[in-house]
Amino acid sequence: MPAKWLLKSDPEHYSFLDLVRDGKTVWDGISNNLALKHLRNVRRGDLLMIYHTGEERAAVGLAEALSDPYPDPKQKDPRLAVIDLQAKGKLARPVSLDEIKKTNSLKGFDLVRMPRLSVMPVSDAHWEIILEMAGKKSS
């Protein structure tokens, strides 16, 4: 069973619609140690929830990891990892951070506990709750 992850993106820099348009991309720019640790654990075939930061602050779409992590070819630091990913589909409706925070069953979710972290694991239960909130059943 594939693992599930949440990846944050600033939609002004690269939005989920940009990913849909491009089809696939290299997910780079992660420098936080804990976020890098999580990114290094992503495996090909894992499911990814794309979350927009900034004014939107909402889960907006789903993607799939096309590769295991590898060193960022644009950087000289081998500890900086990237993955390749492709869009799988837009959520029926965005699920806002405010909604997530108000949902008791999501109180332990890393997005609530560590809101600045840009890559985080998502439990199967949390994944399903967010998809239900978005109006989409299982992925």
Image (spheres, rainbow, N blue to C red):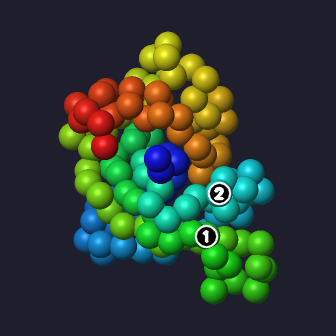
* Rendered image quadrant of residue 55: top left
* Residue at x 26%, y 54% (from the top left corner): 89
Q: Of all residues shown, which one is farthest toward the top?
A: 104
Horizontal and vertical percent position of residue 100: 45, 26
The numbered dot on residue 41 is: 2
Horizontal and vertical percent position of residue 133: 31, 27
Instruction: Locate residue 113 relative to residue 16 in the image: left or right.
Output: right
Up the image or down, 132 lies above or below 116; here it is above
Residue 44 at least partly seen: yes
The numbered dot on residue 23 is: none
Residue type at numbered disc 2:
Asn
Q: Earlier in the sequence, mark 2 or mark 1?
A: 2
Q: Residues within 10 Å of mark 1 (few under 14, many from 20)?
A: many
The C terminus lies in which quarter of the figure? top left
Instruction: Locate residue 65 relative to residue 88 in the image: left or right.
Output: right
Q: Residues within 10 Å of mark 2 (few under 14, many from 20)?
A: some
Up the image or down, 90 lies above or below 40; here it is above
Instruction: Locate residue 30 relative to residue 64 in the image: left or right.
Output: right
Query: How far is disc 2 from disc 1 in space, using C-alphas?
Result: 8 Å
Residue type at numbered disc 1:
Pro
Tell me the element at label 1.
loop
Q: Nearer the viewer, residue 44 or 58?
A: 44
The numbered dot on residue 69 is: 1
* Residue at x 32%, y 62% (from the top left corner): 87
Q: Are the residues flagged by discs 2 and 1 in contact, CB closer than 8 Å? A: yes
Tell me the element at label 2.
loop
* Residue at x 44%, y 40% (from the top left corner): 57
Horizontal and vertical percent position of residue 5: 52, 48
Q: Nearer the viewer, residue 90 or 11?
A: 90
Horizontal and vertical percent position of residue 93: 24, 38
